[in-house]
C-alpha cells in the first residue's frame, strides 16, 4: 500500500508596507466616537448609505453657517514623525456645489489643505503633507459661513506620497 507523507506548507509573512496601513481607527464610520465637531456648531450623525462600494455608513454633517470652520474632524495616532503622509476621504454634497476645505493639520507642522466643490456623487479626495510631526488632525469643514451639508466616509491617512482609492 502506498503511504502519503504529510505536506508541510510554509508561509513567509513580510512586514506590512507602511503605505498600506491606514492609521484612522474608524474609517468606515461605524459609530461616531472617533470623530468630533469642528467650530462647536452644527451637527453630525451616522447615516446608512448604499451607494458606495465597501462602505455601509457615512457621517452626515450639517453646518448651519454660524461659525467659520464648521465641520468634522478625527485625530488618528500616527507612529512615525518627520515623513510624508497622505490623507484621503470620500465626500459628496447633498445637492452638489457645496464648498468645503479638506485639511491635514499637524501640531508640530506643517499643514496642508485643499478647497473643494462637492458634487452630488461620491468623489475620492487626497492631499499630502511632508515632514509631518506632532499630533495629526484630518478635517472637512465648510469653506465659509454659509449653511452647508455633506457626507463623508472612508477617512484615511497613510505614510506615503500617494494614496489610492481606499476601500478599507
Image: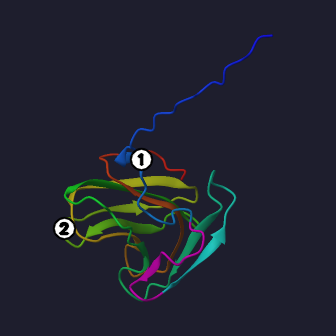
Badge 2, how many Cα within 10 Å: few under 14, some, many 20+? some
When asked about the image quadrant of residue 70, the answer is bottom left
Q: Main secondary structure of the magenta part?
A: loop
Q: Is residue 136 left or right of residue 52?
A: left
User: Where residue 126 sits in the image (x, y, percent)?
Assistant: 38, 54
User: Where residue 15 sits in the image (x, y, percent)?
Assistant: 38, 43
Q: Is residue 91 above or below residue 31?
A: above
How far apart are the alpha carbons under marks 1 and 2? 23 Å
Span colored in magenta: 29-41
Please tell me which residue lies in front, 20 or 106: 20
Taking the spot 29% from the left edge, 46% from the top edge, the residue there is 161
**What residue sits right under mark 2 in the picture?**
109
User: Circle 1 sits in a helix, a strand or a loop, which is it?
Assistant: helix
Q: Quadrant of the N terminus?
A: top right
Circle 1 or circle 2, nearest the eye: 1
Please tell me which residue lies in front, 105 or 114: 105
Q: Is residue 44 above or below residue 151?
A: below
Q: Mark 1 or mark 2: which comes first in sequence? A: 1
Taking the spot 38% from the left edge, 85% from the top edge, the residue there is 39
**What residue sits right under mark 1 in the picture?**
20
User: Circle 2 sits in a helix, a strand or a loop, which is it?
Assistant: loop
Residue 6 included in the magenta stretch of the image: no
Badge 1, how many Cα within 10 Å: few under 14, some, many 20+? some
Amino acid at each position: 500500500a502506498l503511504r502519503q507523507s504529510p505536506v508541510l506548507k510554509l508561509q513567509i509573512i513580510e512586514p506590512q508596507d507602511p503605505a498600506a496601513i491606514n492609521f484612522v481607527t474608524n474609517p468606515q464610520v461605524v459609530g461616531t466616537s472617533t470623530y468630533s465637531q469642528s467650530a462647536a456648531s452644527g451637527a453630525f450623525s451616522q447615516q446608512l448609505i448604499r451607494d458606495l462600494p465597501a462602505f455601509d455608513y457615512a457621517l452626515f454633517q450639517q453646518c448651519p453657517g454660524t461659525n467659520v470652520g464648521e465641520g468634522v474632524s478625527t485625530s488618528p495616532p500616527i507612529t512615525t514623525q518627520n515623513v510624508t503622509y497622505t490623507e484621503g476621504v470620500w465626500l459628496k454634497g447633498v445637492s452638489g456645489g457645496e464648498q468645503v476645505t479638506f485639511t491635514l493639520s499637524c501640531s508640530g507642522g506643517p499643514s496642508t489643505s485643499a478647497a473643494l466643490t462637492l458634487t452630488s456623487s461620491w468623489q475620492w479626495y487626497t492631499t499630502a503633507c511632508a515632514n509631518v510631526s506632532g499630533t495629526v488632525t484630518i478635517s472637512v469643514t465648510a469653506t465659509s459661513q454659509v449653511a452647508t451639508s455633506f457626507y463623508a466616509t472612508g477617512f484615511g491617512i497613510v505614510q506615503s506620497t500617494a494614496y489610492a482609492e481606499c476601500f478599507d
